[in-house]
Amino acid sequence: MSSGSLVIPFPKITSGPQKTARASIVLSTNSPVSHFSNNLVVSFHRKELNQILFYYGTMVSKGEWRDYAIDTGSHEAAFSIFRHSSEQPLYRIEKVPKLANKQGAYRIIGPDGQTLKRGKDLGLVLKIFDKKIEDIQK
């Protein structure tokens, strides 16, 4: 982090004696405010984040996932899910509006970089995690 960065920590999420997760957002104070007003930035809306965080919270409570990161850019937004923050992401949930009319704006990418599911409706794309939740409960 640079000296002009602001870190906003989220409260610690605990579920059991050894299962903890912590996340934070880093905001850079060096970038001009006009950067966001002149260029469009793709991001997740509140409804989309609620859908993603439902699955994320469930998997955190099961001890499978521990950390996440949200990246936004001019062409895509990504929600990366980690088992440990020092590793590569287990999954990346991407939103690419440019592909909305072709393949669908949403896709889930696995740890090896292959696209696991793609579609126009985020709720349907996230259903891929239902089977993983069922497997853990057994």
Image: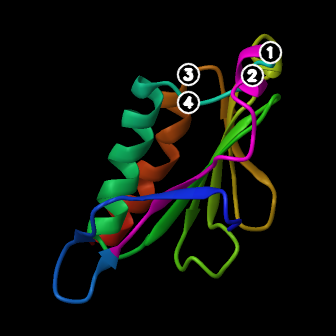
**Front residue of 5 and 73:** 5
Which residue is found at the position 54% from the left and 80% from the top?
A: 84
**Residue 111 placement (x, y as % from top left):** 71, 67
Q: Residue at x 83, y 16 (%)?
A: 102
What kind of residue is marked 3? Asp
**Magenta region includes residue 29:** yes
Which residue occupies 37% across, 35% down?
Answer: 50
Rounded to the nearest angstrom, the CA distance separating label 3 from label 1 is 28 Å
Question: What residue is pinned by disc 2?
Answer: 34
Please report the bounds of the magenta region as a residue range. 21-38
The residue furthest top is 101
Residue 85 among magenta residues: no
Closer to viewer: mark 3 or mark 4: 4
**Circles 2 and 1 in contact, beta carbons < 8 Å:** yes
Residue at the bottom extreme, as displayed:
18
Q: Which of pointers 3 and 4 lies earlier in the amino acid sequence?
A: 4
Horizontal side of 66 relative to 32 (left or right) equals left
Asked whether, in this view, residue 18 is left or right of residue 110, the answer is left
Task: Find disc 4 in the rendering and name its residue.
Answer: 44
